[in-house]
Amino acid sequence: MEAARLHEYTEEMDQALQIDDVDEPTVSEPTDVIVEVTGAGWCQTDNHIIEGMWTEYVDQTLPMTLGHENAGIVREVGDLVDTVDVGDPVICHPVQTCGVCRPCRLGEDMYCEHSVFNGLTTDGGFAEYLHTSDRATIPLPAGVDPTEIAPHADAGITAYHAAKKAVAELNPGDTAVVIGIGGLGHIGLQCLQAMSAATIVAVDLKQEALELAADLGADETVDSSDEDVADAIASITDEVGAQQVLDFVGRDETTALAPDITAAGGDHHIIGYGGMITEPAQALVNGEFAFRGTLVGQYTELQELVALVDRGDVTLHTDHYSLDEVNTVAERLEHGEIEGRAVIEP
Ligand code: NAD
Ligand code: ZN
């Protein structure tokens, strides 16, 4: 089968991945599931992986097929699999967990002590077939197209995970700020809306992204390319600040906003990454705000997100590309030329 693989870390996105002819994955463990990938979202994390940004945090062996936002049709199952059947449309949690370690038993899939992560530590879904497991596959309700829903496997679950933590702290009358209305952010905004009564402010430096945010129902938009974000949030919140900030950018300039835009006792959630957090300790003491990290999300949260999608509360803005266009997508995303999410159809 054809697979888009990373052979060497590089900054050159126009030659990031190579289309190779590789063996199709097969069932080897009784809990294995082989999925024919109909859609695989391209995430900015793919660009980060290509640049070698994850080598400090996980073991990677190249060449590796990228793609961690996968959905499709089950084509083969191991003898012990009874949660999905051949022919079922499914969305795939990117992490295959052991199920028996303490974090797994607590439902903390992302902390599993024996996990493998498609497209990050093992082959992913920019290929015709994906090797995964019964614990990572979620059958889709009738009428939900796996090709359309693929980005929820990572962009969606991550945005949902952060939004759910934020919503637990948001009261009616509070303000939530979403920074970066791209692949993740346009989903995060809708999750906040579906689950809270807060005023939602979208911040981006691209006009198209702000238009998308307004279409999706953001109460206010702030163009950070020509507005002072701190002034704008102060004016929207009567100088109180935002109780919850979802930072889907995570660069120096957005993490630096925290002391100025976060309300006392609030949280600045770090979802996007690449920059640094450099604040005086006293700033956190004075405002008693917190930086909180977010890593993807739990299997059960993906189920919850699928329920929101099924209710029509969360929609995706996507464009579709073929497997041999992966490097075009990588380049376009690098230059901010993708609205919403790009989905590869292998
Ligand atoms: P994306 O490129 O689709 O979206 C980013 C958006 O942020 C774009 O709309 C862009 O215009 C906007 N933006 C960029 N710089 C900005 C700035 N300084 N101020 C305001 N807006 C700005 O990217 P994505 O795929 O949505 O990923 C977003 C981030 O989340 C990336 O860093 C990615 O690696 C990360 N990510 C994290 C996790 C996790 O588990 N924490 C999972 C997936 C992706
Ligand atoms: Zn485990």
Image: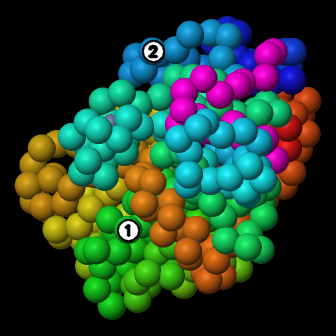
Q: What residue is rendered at 82% in x and 28% in y?
A: 327
Q: With respect to residue 137, does 179 lie above or below? A: below
Query: Residue placed farthest to the front in the image?
Result: 79
Q: Which residues are magenta?
A: 22-46
Q: Amino acid at mark 1?
A: Lys
Tell me: residue 186, above or below residue 34: below
Q: Would residue 328 be found to the left or right of residue 313 on screen?
A: right
Disc on the earlier residue, 1 or 2: 2
Quadrant location, the N terminus: top right
Q: Secondary structure at mark 2?
A: loop
Residue 1 left/right relative to 193: right
Image quadrant holding the C terminus, namely top right
Assess whether residue 290 is covered by the magenta stretch: no
Residue at horizontal 62 percent and vertical 53 percent from the top: 84
Between 266 and 3, which is closer to the camera in this rendering? 3
Horizontal relation, residue 151 to residue 303: left or right? right
- Indicate whether residue 38 is drawn in magenta: yes
Give residue 164's position: percent from left, percent from top.
38, 68
Q: Residue 341: in sight, yes or no?
A: no
- Disc 1 versus disc 2: distance between alpha carbons? 30 Å
**Location of residue 218 in the rendering, given as x and y in whole percent from the top left corner:** 57, 80
Residue 260: % across, % down: 30, 61
The residue carrying pointer 1 sits among few (fewer than 14), some (14 to 19) or many (20 or more) residues within 10 Å by Cα, namely some
Name the residue carrying label 1.
164
Q: Is residue 1 above or below residue 170?
A: above
Give the residue at x 78% y 53%: 87
Can residue 31 be seen in this snapshot?
yes
In which image quadrant can residue 266 be found? bottom left
- Mark 2 C-beta closer than 8 Å to ligand 2: no
Q: Which residue matches tag 2?
A: 59
> Are the residues tagged 1 and 2 within 8 Å (C-beta)?
no
